[in-house]
Amino acid sequence: MAQQGVASILAVALVLVAFASFPAVHSIGVCNGVIGNNLPAPSDVVKLYQTKGIDAMRIYAPESNVLKALSGTGISLLMDVGNGALTSLANDPSAAPAWVKANVQPFPGVSFRYIAVGNEVTDSAGQKTILPAMKNIQTALAAAGLSGSIKVSTSLRFDVVNNTSPPSNGVFADTSFMGPILDFLASTGAPLLVNVYPYFAYKGDQQNIKLDFATFVPGSTTVTDNGLTYSNLFDAMVDSIYAALEKAGKPDVKVVISESGWPSAGGVGATAQNARAYNQGLINHVRGGTPKKPSLLETYIFAMFNENQKTGDPTENNFGLFNPDKSPAYSVTFYSWWTRSTPNERPNVYCAKLLDSSAENLHIKRRVVCLVYIHCIRCMQIQPDILENNPRSMAKQGVASMLAVALVLVSLAAFHTECSAHRAANPDGHTKGVHSIGVCNGVIGNNLPAPSDVVKLYKSKGINAMRIYAPESNVLKALSGTGIGLLMDVGNGALPGLANDPSAAAAWVKANVQPYPGVSFRYIAVGNEVMDSDGQKTILPAMKNLQGALAAAGLGGRVKVSTSVRFDVVTDTFPPSNGVFADLDYMGPILDFLVSTGAPLLVNVYPYFAYKGDPQNIKLNYATFAPGITVNDDGNGLTYTNLFDAMVDSIYAALEDAETPGVKVVVSESGWPSAGGFGATAQNAQAYNQGLIKHVGGGTPKRPGPLETYMFAMFNENQKTGDPTENHFGLFNPDKSPAYSISF
């Protein structure tokens, strides 16, 4: 942690100050329906997901061939139990453990995310089975040590919400049905899954619901409700769900859109052009959430393929993004807004090309322009079960209530752009809402709380990720079943053994990972700030051996292996666009490994040490996220308001220079001490750490998406040696009282 390559950081700061001038974001999934006699084999389906960059899938019943194909891919899975299984799962407690044993436990390499207990169950008898079945599945997962990593919910039609005119009036139509389900979700931290289809509203009342408003295309319909501005029907529908959750006393229950789509043929408005406009708009849009909840909205598009054996309305056969031969039904791109046409193309160059492209992308252009020029994160929005057991009722979608939404919204129409509304609400340019930020749990102290109390404090403060610096069985036991994501170091002392003996890696995994299936392992850090050349030579062999051991244990797709490096592995960071790796002979093979496995590069980033080393040239405001200096980097045309962004963007520049631009960066440590040295005050620590929490949800100027970050540290540690500040990086004192006020 110490020093952080002060020389190179000072160079960043000095040059950026010289340039000073005044001021002038989760995945989207796709549902894999299988009601067809000409669909690709599961292995080919999974390959198509991978080649298209689709990192989440929904399936409507357990299919062993699909689960085998998904193993080790890292593709997240929402899996339905199948409506036909509800009765037995609800009435027979032994049925749920048998279901988990048959459909979950044999597939440890599958990244199970949610189990959906029921899909659009509307008959009263069926609805009565949902909650008992959910509870039995939850208990079975807990008994298998999996309740922390897999959430249990149910997937509902949109018309469980009523009085959606306007969205702020939304309430649940049947609180006696929904109330107990919401209580369960709140107690387990699981989301509410809802199928949301603006298509059916448009189909039902084209006179009052404009096509532009239904398909994310800019048009004359921009409406306001309760101080919020709506430019599309999808947002209005989702926000009515949020309003209903608030009225039910469950505002913190997360919403996941478990289905949404538009057909390309077979009915009114069902054209390839409209389907492309809606689905591409949906992909671009959900990164920024809705006006009421402007944060990432997890969404599953229906569906991957056109299914020729679905019955009912002809549109049901034509919701696919792809034809059964894997050719596109129409052009759709799964990308972040900064996707580049070539690996080395700068984001601003790509955006310029996009702005010059065809008029059909106008709705994308609007959001890119808004994002690039006013840093408005909101505008970054660039199988069913066997038929006899699950007659899908995708159609109708509560058309009456959706029409009410649309009619009232149209009557409220007023000209107001989406971006200007959000920018007014977020003048600092960052989206409100909680993004994943973790806290490092250091243990070099003789007065620290017990692991169980530590984990309780994480949960009470809403901290959803932890880093630990060595496997600690008591900590792992305390984390089991909590859902807290874990970054776990192997410990530098273990590197030689893990590097030289593959059996040592297998033994390490067997001792420290496999006994804890209820822990949400996220990353294994092989080495932390290893600087000596002998130690560095052990890192890559140890990483490879651990990766092999995890793969052999069926965990290679779920747990990623990386190493945590100091910031000064990057040099020439002035300006950030010039950043390169100081030693490519060392870093190059590590980056190749990360590319091959999809793991991120972990980097410890500390603006504090730069400020401490040169307070004359590095202003406190610039180092602590406080308003003050605004600087430009002529190399990339980007504007910086804080040193943290400049440092992280120099890492991205180095990754581009090393021809590995797709490697994700995770900031594995960052913090500010509250005592013990120059600039180390509670006021400065609070300013930096609170600023960091608020800031990383929007990312950096070069990569404006959520930046996974771990703050150092949870507690002040009284037995750390070295500079006195090392004892004062904690957010909390050992008695669990705050070192200063901080809010997650």
Image: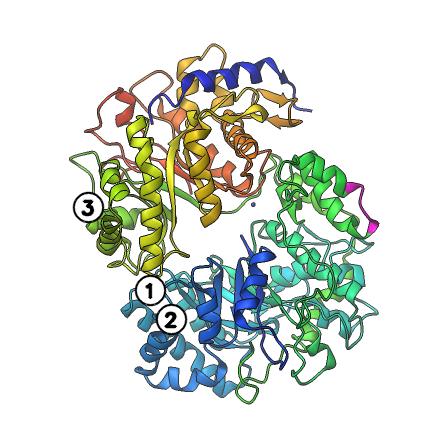
Question: Which mark, residue 104?
Answer: 2
- The residue lying toward the viewer, choosing from 632 and 196, is 632
- The residue lying toward the viewer, choosing from 119 and 348, is 348
Image position, residue 559 (x, y; %): 38, 53
Query: What SS does tag 3 mark?
Result: loop
The quadrant in which the N terminus is found is top left
Q: Is residue 208 left or right of residue 290?
A: right
**Magenta segment:** 355-359
N-term mark: 3 or 2: 2
Q: Nearer the viewer, mark 1 or mark 3?
A: 1
Count the labels in the image: 3
Q: Is residue 372 left or right of residue 113?
A: right
Image quadrant in which you'd find residue 404? bottom right
- Secondary structure of the magenta portion, mostly? loop
Query: What SS does tag 1 mark?
Result: loop
Amino acid type, callout 3: Ala
Q: Which residue is mark 3?
A: 450
Asked if the residues shown at circle 1 and circle 2 are in contact, with their CB atoms under 8 angstroms apart, the answer is yes
Amino acid type, callout 1: Leu
Graded by Cα atoms within 10 Å as few (under 14), some (14 to 19) or many (20 or more), the crowding at tag 2 reads many
Amino acid type, callout 2: Val
